Image: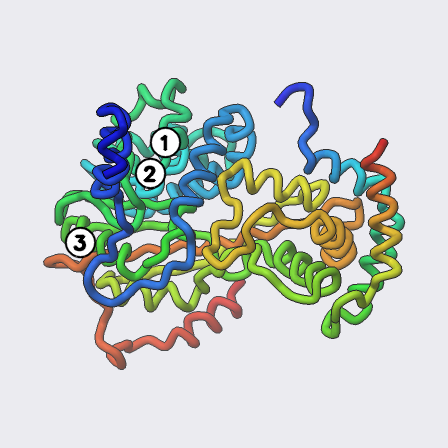
Amino acid sequence: MPGRTRPVDRLASASVKCAKEGAAYGKCITADYKNIHKDKCLTEFLKLKQCYTAALKR
Amino acid sequence: MRSSLLPRSVRRNCLRPATFTTARSYAIQAPGAPTLEVFNRHTKWLQRDKSASNVEESRSVDYIRDEVASRLCERLLDINRNFPHVLDFGANACNIARTLTLPGIDIDSTAPVSAPLKTRIGKLTAADSSPSMLYRDEDLPFNNEIDIIRDVLKTEETLPYGAETFDAVLSSLSLHWINDLPNLLRQINLILKPDAPFMGVMLGGDSLFELRTSLQLAELDTRGGVGSHTSPLADVRDIGGLLQGAGFKLLTVDVDDIVVDYPSSFALMKDLQAMGESNAVVSREMGAIRRDTLMAAEAIYKEMHGNEDGSIPATFRLIYMIGWKPGPNQQEPLERGSGMVSIKDILEGQNKTP
């Protein structure tokens, strides 16, 4: 659709800006991926989400 | 009576819904063993039909289907005969028909060595349930080069053809959405002429395992549970049994992995959607996938499976199958224990003389 960016494209461009936070979160998860429970990496995830929110607002 | 006070036209309108209910269509199950519904066929139909109506985008994601169709058609070269009437079951955008019109190319040289496969095919029936998918490339020149009939199916679970109609049945990348695969393979066996081959390829086993694991880990961490985001797929070892159970002989099953690199998991999911290959599992969570899950999955995908240049690989595991309908004078495997040459001697002998 011209003139309108799809949400998935906006997420994709935001993910590029949040590569550092993404790597930190990914490392936290993969460090012990056989033993995941809810909110295991909450601090890293909140940082990641904060970055996405900021990037999406722009 | 109050309703008699209403004007005549209103009364008639009130009655209308009652007459309409009799015309409602029910999902009727064929008699016999009950089939488990894994995929929502209607959802799948909507996804595929919608994806193909955006012609440009749909064509831009044909890379997997074209590649797989050419690999499947290559196998036709191994069979030295002509096929007067061939069925392409689950034709998608007629990728097989297009491939058949291309000149055969030898991998070792750049010059085309064989005539296009269409010269050995009389008539091709391309059957699919989605009209916009099936007729997407109707105007392209390859349609004039091959005798092709497009056939829109009501459902892909039942085939509307008579017994012993086709000289070969091909199927590329559509069997993985069939609910009752054993039943469909039996139907394919039925519509084949005696001593005619079925050649199919479907996604299976560990296809998209990177996406599957990333989404699972992401959901475990952000939500504390796992939803079904990717289809359950048939495994290689199941296929042999399935073909045998459907009555095919002289089976050949082999596996091929195609790994495609994408810039991000979002690009992968966008392409899957454009192919009409989005999730249609009955037990899936309704509504769009959560943004939190997507963010987390992207980070995990990059970290766990990502390439060094920042792109991510996605594995498509293709299971090729060939089965022959039994016929008179068909070659049969020799009786067990009747072999006079040890394969061990032959293989070891090859090693000695390089």
The residue located at (23%, 29%) in the rendering is B12
User: In the image, is residue B83 above or below residue B145?
Assistant: below
* Mark whose residue sits in front, 1 or 3: 1
* Mark whose residue sits in front, 3 or 2: 2
Q: Amino acid at mark 1?
A: Leu
Chain letter for mark 2, please.
B
Q: Amino acid at mark 3?
A: Leu
| Cβ–Cβ under 8 Å for marks 1 and 2 | yes
Q: Local crowd at mark 3 within 10 Å, few (<14), some, or many (≥20)? A: many
Q: Local crowd at mark 2 within 10 Å, few (<14), some, or many (≥20)? A: many
Q: Which mark is residue B128?
A: 2
> Label 1's element?
helix
Q: Amino acid at mark 2?
A: Asp
**Residue located beneath label 1 in the image:** B134
Q: Give the image location of residue B35, x and y in percent.
A: 31, 63
The residue located at (33%, 75%) in the rendering is B341
Chain letter for mark 1, please.
B
Among numbered discs 3 and 2, the one appearing first in the sequence: 2
User: In the image, is residue B150 above or below residue B290?
Assistant: above
Q: Give the image location of residue B174, x and y in percent.
A: 40, 46
* Residue B114 shows in the view: no
Distance in Å between CA atoms under marks 3 and 2 = 19 Å
Q: Is residue B261 left or right of B78 when viewed as pictured?
A: right
Depth check, front residue: B108 or B97: B97
> Label 3's element?
helix
**Residue located beneath label 3 in the image:** B190
Depth check, front residue: A34 or B254: A34
Q: Residue placed farthest to the bottom in the image?
A: B337
Same-subunit check for callouts 3 and 2: yes
Q: Is residue B306 left or right of B111 when viewed as pictured?
A: right
